[in-house]
């Protein structure tokens, strides 16, 4: 839907013709000077805030699915009836207005008081509909745990703690994080923050008072040394112990470290934490040339951000094309072209052999000059604690469809969890921010005995200069890739298929199609 100017937006208080809005359609307008979208589902009409509470995406350009609206940018999902943020990456609700239909006209009146609305646990509908009577009965028959401990302060950990409180849980919630910073917007670390377009205070996901107000005991710089499942107790490395009624493991992943001959610690940087990104920003202030090792999403986003700072960037990777293993050679070549057009120099089919001062020697014998080096060659799930505790493992922590591990009352979410994916029909583990948040939310509901299956199609996005790549689904292997559109024009979709089944779809400049592909996967 095309964007409207302020003067052309309809005033919904004056009424809007019913016939001008089709079933499933949305239109942007205003009420008392505030931006509002009017949405229709069958004979029902809804008026809600016009922008996603995540990155301010325009919801009028999104998709109505049942009684929800999905954001076109990063696929957050909101309940049209209550405004509640049902699925990450948005955590905060959108506003709602009272709607009245009179004859052939719809009128939007005052903004509703969401605090007076029905409790989220009662009003919630998932993107696939209301809970079944069986699930609702099961959730009532078993009491909630007296205390919940969350190990990990990343996407899954915060989303879980947030959902526990939103769902009305009144017991003790303790979040134990090895990081020195409170939960933050990790995707931004390699994008706008590294490029110098986002300030430090934009990065925390919640202000300090949030944890106090929500009674979430956040322990930073704290590492768990042992997990005793039998006695339902964890012990920190400093000797302090915590008992739990239910436990969520959300320990994330650690960057793969490369042993490079001659390299010193102050030359090599990895990007995983807020501190890592700040260290690279500090180095970038005086740097003229940087070598990025690895043509991963992180490596290429770092390259784009450093180019935005005017730094010469050389990318060294063993691949024939960037991201070929994930996106295939055609899309990989498209992304390579984006970077080369911005001055990035690729050294593909190469690895770093050694470093001597500022001189980086490649395996093929050529040399590069670098002020510092950023390595982005993947991550490994942090599963040592789970292994020590004897949980079932399969290249990650094995969980069922409810994200529960082999130990009852112990759940896992995010980069460490390998779950039965209903879309691919396989057990998968992915390292995507949005997936981790959504799994944290579902795990929290299941800690409260909601018995909700994790059925969201995996989704991630990657930013390369002014081009965003959206990817929905999961395809480790495929028979062929069907490309619709023209790569050279930056407007296309790539469908990764096995036989007649579409496993995943990557899109550029086709946000609505990405949403429709996600909804189609989840409806099957």
Image (spheres, rainbow, N blue to C red):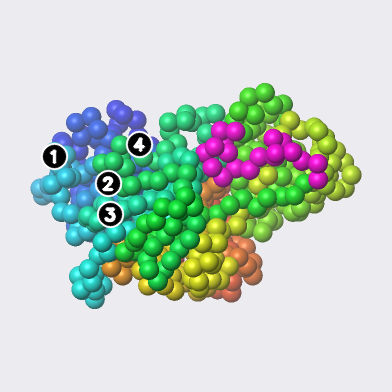
The circle drawn on residue 215 is 2
Q: Residue furthest right?
A: 365
**Upstream in sequence: badge 2 or badge 1:** 1
Nearer the viewer's eye, disc 4 or disc 3?
Answer: 3
Q: Which residues are magenta?
A: 261-279
Marks 4/2: CA distance?
13 Å
Residue behind mark 4: 207
Q: Using the image, tell me which numbered label, if any, was put on residue 172.
A: 3
**Is 481 placed above or below 240 here?**
below
Q: Is residue 132 visible?
A: no
Name the residue: 55% across, 58% down: 382
Kind of element beneath mark 4: loop
Q: Front-most of 162 and 87?
A: 162
The mark nearer the N terminus, 4 or 3, is: 3
Q: Position of residue 376 (x, y in %)?
A: 65, 47
Distance between mark 4 and mark 3 Cα atoms: 20 Å
User: Which residue lies most toward the left here?
Assistant: 102
Q: Earlier in the sequence, mark 1 or mark 4?
A: 1
Residue contact between numbered discs 1 and 4, judged by CB atoms under 8 Å = no
Task: Tell me the residue at 81%/41% (across/down).
Answer: 262
Q: Earlier in the sequence, mark 4 or mark 2?
A: 4
Whether pointer 4 and pointer 3 mark residues with C-beta atoms closer than 8 Å, the reply is no
Q: Single out the mark in the foreground, 1 or 3.
A: 3
Q: Are the residues at dot 1 and dot 3 in contact (C-beta closer than 8 Å)?
A: no
User: Does the residue at mark 3 contact the one at mark 2 (Cβ under 8 Å)?
Assistant: yes
């Amino acid at each position: 839907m095309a964007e409207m100017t302020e003067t052309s937006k309809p005033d919904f208080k004056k009424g809007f013709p019913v016939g001008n809005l089709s079933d499933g359609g949305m239109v942007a307008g205003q009420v008392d000077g505030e931006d509002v979208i009017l949405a229709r589902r069958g004979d029902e009409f809804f008026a809600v805030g016009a922008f996603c509470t995540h990155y301010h995406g325009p919801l009028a350009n999104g998709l109505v699915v049942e009684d929800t609206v999905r954001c076109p940018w990063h696929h957050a999902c909101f309940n049209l009836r209550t405004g509640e943020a049902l699925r990450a990456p948005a955590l905060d609700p959108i506003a709602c207005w009272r709607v009245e239909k009179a004859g052939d006209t719809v009128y939007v009146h005052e903004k509703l008081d969401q605090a007076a609305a029905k409790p989220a646990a009662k009003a919630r509908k998932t993107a696939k509909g209301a809970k079944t009577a069986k699930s609702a009965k099961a959730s009532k028959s078993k009491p909630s745990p007296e205390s919940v401990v969350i190990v990990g302060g990343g996407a899954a950990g915060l989303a879980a703690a947030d959902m526990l409180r939103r769902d009305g849980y009144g017991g003790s919630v303790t979040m134990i994080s090895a990081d020195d910073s409170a939960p933050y917007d990790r995707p931004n670390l390699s994008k706008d923050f590294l490029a110098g377009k986002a300030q430090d205070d934009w990065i925390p996901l919640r202000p300090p008072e949030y944890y106090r107000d929500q009674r979430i005991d956040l322990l930073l710089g704290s590492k768990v040394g042992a997990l005793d499942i039998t006695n339902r107790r964890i012990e920190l490395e400093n000797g302090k112990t915590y008992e739990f009624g239910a436990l969520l493991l959300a320990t994330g992943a650690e960057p793969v470290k490369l042993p490079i001959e001659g390299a010193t610690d102050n030359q090599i940087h990895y990007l995983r934490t807020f501190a890592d990104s700040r260290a690279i920003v500090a180095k970038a202030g005086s740097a003229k040339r940087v070598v990025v090792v690895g043509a991963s999403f992180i490596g290429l986003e770092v390259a784009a951000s450093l180019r935005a700072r005017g730094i010469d960037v050389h990318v060294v990777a063993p691949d024939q094309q960037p991201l070929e293993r994930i996106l295939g050679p055609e899309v990989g070549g498209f992304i390579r072209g984006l970077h080369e057009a911005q001055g990035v120099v690729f050294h593909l089919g190469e690895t770093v052999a050694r470093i001597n001062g500022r001189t980086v020697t490649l395996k093929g014998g050529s040399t590069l000059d670098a002020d510092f080096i950023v390595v982005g060659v993947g991550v490994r799930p942090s599963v040592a604690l789970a292994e020590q505790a004897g949980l079932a493992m399969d290249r990650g922590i094995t969980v069922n469809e409810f994200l529960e591990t082999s130990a009852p009352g112990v759940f896992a979410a995010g980069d460490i969890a390998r779950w039965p994916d209903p879309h691919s029909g396989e057990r998968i583990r992915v390292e995507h921010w949005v997936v981790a948040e959504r799994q944290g939310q579902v795990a929290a509901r299941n800690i409260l005995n909601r018995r909700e299956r994790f059925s969201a199609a995996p989704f991630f996005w990657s930013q390369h200069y002014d081009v965003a790549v959206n990817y929905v689904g999961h395809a480790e292997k495929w028979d062929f890739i069907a490309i619709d559109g023209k790569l050279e024009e930056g407007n296309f979709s790539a469908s990764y298929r096995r036989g007649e089944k579409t496993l995943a779809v990557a899109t550029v400049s086709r946000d609505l199609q990405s949403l429709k592909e996600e909804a189609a996967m989840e409806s099957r």
